[in-house]
Image (spheres, grey):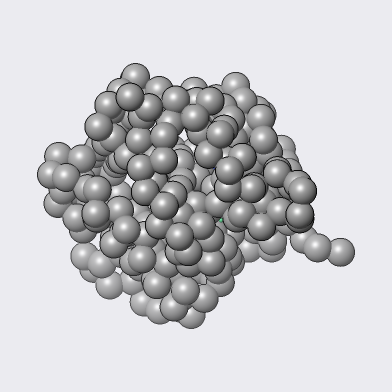
Amino acid sequence: MRKTTFEHLQDGTDLQQQTYGDWPIWQRTIPFPSNLLMGSSGTHLLETYLVVGSAWWQVLSHDLKPGAAVLDIGCGCAKIARFLALDPRVVQYVGFDPIPQSIEWSNAFVVPRAFGRFRFEHVDLYSAEYNPQGTIQPTAFRFPGDDASYDILIAASLFTHLLEADARHYLAEAARVMKPEGRFVLSIHDEPPEGERYVGGEARVDIALDYFLSMARDSGLDLADDLGSLCGQHALVFQRLS
Ligand SMILES: C[S@@+](CC[C@H](N)C(=O)[O-])C[C@H]1O[C@@H](n2cnc3c(N)ncnc32)[C@H](O)[C@@H]1O
């Protein structure tokens, strides 16, 4: 029977010390998470972890302006944040995720390399796949941030794991915390069976593109750019509806 990501993580010992392939941890560098922890963010392979993180950073670079405040929704174990930490345009970064080991790792190894600009928060959000003992329903969660407080929002491979009610709430929260000129860069799987529009569970969700765009519009978000394929998913950039 398929194991959930949560069950895989229960096999891990000492997730905070181990680094990929037992590589050493060098001073003034960000190490690599263990294979198990990387796996919880979509890949056990260091090469893929680095290629995907770098690709997302380059995509985000297009919209990043000096002084940017960034919210990374479902930040995992800092696959993208490790690149943003070295980007001087980012003056404030907040990432949150329901996997406590990912947040502990990011706080231990990324925060000290980010010169006081980065913060990772554990939020005990319920997810059948990632956090089945979670006490907070995603539909009840208010994103960390005032109205209109972020320039860039990121949801890399997050809507691929959200049930429809949760996705609708997250789109509305994103619209709330996004500055008027802000951008929300996200990815979806968009291959539901013919005639279906929102299919799957927290292990994998597929959404018909037109339906997702209509959900975003319902929340006050408009498509700014369709980036097509990115790392096996469909990447989209949203702005606030004018
Ligand atoms: C495929 S991983 C992607 C992680 C990260 N964005 C990246 O690109 O490496 C999906 C992440 O979403 C997180 N997640 C699942 N449900 C969530 C929710 N309701 N709110 C925020 N994060 C969630 C999981 O814990 C997991 O870290």
Left or right of 63 on screen, residue 131: right
Instruction: Say which quarter of the image contains residue 50.
Output: bottom left
Left or right of 2 on screen, residue 64: left
In the image, is residue 167 above or below residue 57? above
Give coordinates of residue 216: x percent, y percent. 51, 33
| Residue for point 33% across, 71% down | 25
Pick the residue in front: 123 or 169. Answer: 169
Task: Specify the quadrant that holds the C terminus.
Answer: top left
Counting the numbered discs, the total is 0
Give coordinates of residue 187: x percent, y percent. 50, 52
Task: Specify the quadrant that holds the N terminus.
Answer: bottom right
Instruction: Say which quarter of the image contains residue 85.
Output: bottom left
Give coordinates of residue 224: x percent, y percent. 35, 42
| Residue with the most extreme right position | 1
Left or right of 144 on screen, residue 89: left
Give coordinates of residue 182: x percent, y percent. 28, 35
| Residue for point 62% across, 32% down | 166
Left or right of 193 on screen, residue 119: left
Instruction: Say which quarter of the image contains residue 137.
Output: top right
Is residue 81 shown to the viewer in this render? yes
| Residue for point 61% across, 40% down | 211
Pick the residue in front: 10 or 162. Answer: 162
Pick the residue in front: 207 or 156. Answer: 207
Is residue 15 shown to the viewer in this render? no
Pick the residue in front: 35 or 27. Answer: 35
In the image, is residue 170 above or below residue 108? above
